[in-house]
Structures are given as C-alpha cells and as structure tokens.
Amino acid sequence: MTIVEAQPAPPREDPAASRESFGARALRVLLTQRIALLAVLIVAVVVTFFVQDAGGYLTAPYDFDYMSASLINAVPLAMLGLAELLVILSGRGGIDLSVGAIVSLAGMTFGFAYGEWGWPLWAAIILTAGFGALLGAVNGFLVSYAGFPALIATLATFYAYKSIAIVINDQQPISTAPIQDLYAITRSVELPVIGPYLPDVPLAIFTFLLPTVVAVWLLLNRTTYGRRLYAIGTNDVAGRWAGLPVRDTRAKAYVYAGLISGLVAVVTVGQFASARPDAGVSGNGMALPAITIAVLGGVAITGGIGRVAGVVLATLLIVWLNAGILLAFVGNEGSQYQLLALGAVLVFAALLNGLTNRRYGAR
C-alpha cells in the first residue's frame, strides 16, 4: 500500500495586500509619468463638466463643438508653453517673463509690415519671427553672457518691450483692411475624410501649433543641441567640464523662445483682427499662464527635465478647464474664477513636481 503524503496548500494571497500593491503601483505611475496623470485629469475635467451640463448647471452647452472651438485659445498658450519649456530646461533658474511683451512688440512690427507697408504675408511672418528671435537674443545675452539672473533680466526686458509696443504707434492699434482680413487664419475648418463626423477644428492648430510642436520635439530629441540643453540644465558645471558650450546653449534657448513668441504674435493679430500694443500683456499677460502650463506639464523649474507632450496635454487641461468655468458662472464672474483655478493649478503642479523629484525622480 502506497502512502501519499498530503502536500501543503499554497498560501493564499491576501486580497487587501494585493489591492494595496495595485494602488501603490497606480500612484507611482501617476506621480512619475506626468503624461498619464494629465490624461487622467483631462478626462476628469471633461466628465465633470459633461455631468454638470446634463444636470442643467451650466449657462450653455459644454459639448464637443464647444470644446473644439475653445482650442483656438490653446494655440498661443501651447506655443508659449513650449517657449518656456526651452528656457526652463536650460537651468540656473531659467525663465522668461518677457514672452508676452515680445508678443505685443512683435505683433506691432507685423502690423506695420503687413498692414501698412504692404509686405507679402510670408515676408511679414518671417520678419516678425526674426524680430522676436532678436528680442529673445537680448534676453539670452543678459542671462548667459552678462550674468544677470533670468528673473531680473526678463522682467527688465518685459517692461522695456511693453513700453516700446505702446508708444511705437501712439498707443493705437493697427487695424487696416489686410489686418482685418487676417482673421481668416483663425477660422475653424472641417477635417478631410472624417470631417463630417467630427467638430470643425481651428485652422491655426495646423498652420502654427502643430509645426511648432514638431519643430521643438525634433530640436530636443533629435539634435545635438537638445542633448546639450538637457545636460546643462541638469548640471551645467559638469557640462562645462565636459567641454559643452554652456553659455551659447543657454543663450540660444532664449533666442528660440523669442522666435516662437514672434509666431504667436501673428496668431494673436489674426485672432483680434488687429495689431494691438497690449495683446500679450493685457490683464495678467501671457507669460504667467505659459509658465503655469510648462510646470504643470512636468517641466522641473530647476532645469533639465521636461517633455513636449506634457506641455501640450497641460494646455488642453487648462483650456478645457477654463472653458467649463466660463459656463459655470453668470457674467464676468467666470473670468475671476479662472484666475483662481490658474493659481491653484500652479501650486498643485509645483507641489507635485517637488514630491515627484524627492520620492521617485521625475520622467
């Protein structure tokens, strides 16, 4: 008779421990993968406003057509967010407070060239982008070669560029017929093939935003300059010992930021159908929302960390959040709550970046 010994049963996995482990893994993904976190937040914001719309709590429908139309606001914000991405990546407290003032001054330059001097549109755009790059080069020189702190240098040029934009045409906008006709570049268009099944999309997304996104992505991920920028942003002392051109690399980041700001100037002229001297500085200006978007998108304020995709998703989050807030309140109250939301988002992003860097190391 053969005696078979009973085998001990395998230990049962504790469901509570398994759930805790899954929760910890999910938290780690959300904290270390900013793209995943932003995607979750975008879904949460959109679903929240859809539910409020279904319950009749909004002053107007929050639907896909409204969301698509609001994307016109994403074009300048995302482009300036990419400009801030470049300068913040350069490290040493890199930041550019003057991007809004560059938009104003470059926009007036575009207004003169295209609206009054009769330049062809393509030549006026090239002139405006080049002029923006020149203004950015002034920032780059002050920060990289003169040794000024970026906060002080770009704050000084903000005031200088803003004042020049105001006085250059006696505080008057340029609204000639060619400038007014430029409003067509911001119109919404139907997508080819699938257009009948989707809302129309602002044309500027394809003519300005997407080319800028692709160009910045290629610059950072497929060029030697991009690798140098990440390197000096992480540790410029090590970069200097490695023989990298630290000052030149950092200065070029401000030049590229100025160039992008010049292109944003063209977009804003088209949006307003007028070259306005306060286009980039009215209210709270364009610089603070752009910085908020960059930080929310995962750009480390210390430099060396940041991705293009994070900036784009952060822009969508801010734009669709602001669009919903406008419908949640009557009159001008919504714009005030937008500022509150912007400040809250900036604090949240800064705290999240600090927590991520301390516990896991950002990606």
Image (cartoon, rainbow, N blue to C red):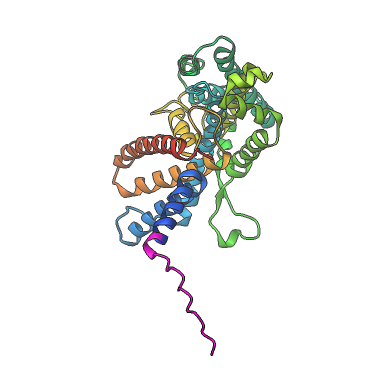
User: In terms of depth relative to the viewer, which is nearer, 54 or 268?
Assistant: 54
User: In terms of depth relative to the viewer, which is nearer, 62 or 12?
Assistant: 12
Q: Is residue 297 above or below residue 120?
A: below
Q: Position of residue 310 (x, y in %)?
A: 53, 41
Side (left or right) of 135 relative to 152:
right
- Outermost residue on the bottom side: it is 1
User: In terms of depth relative to the viewer, which is nearer, 307 or 233?
Assistant: 233
Residue 125 at least partly seen? yes
Q: Count of labels shown?
A: 0
Residue 184 at least partly seen? no
* Residue 183 among magenta residues: no
Most common SS among magenta residues: loop
Q: Position of residue 279 (x, y in %)?
A: 47, 28
Side (left or right) of 79 relative to 166:
right
Q: Quadrant of residue 205?
A: top right
Quadrant location of the C terminus?
A: top right
Q: Is residue 300 above or below residue 329?
A: above
* Residue 11 among magenta residues: yes
Q: Quadrant of residue 53?
A: bottom left
**Point 55% across, 59% down: residue:** 198
**Point 43% across, 47% down: residue:** 320
**Point 51% across, 30% down: residue:** 274
Q: Position of residue 50 (x, y in %)?
A: 38, 58
Magenta span: 1-17
Q: Position of residue 17 (x, y in %)?
A: 39, 60
- Outermost residue on the top side: it is 146
**Point 53% across, 29% down: residue:** 84
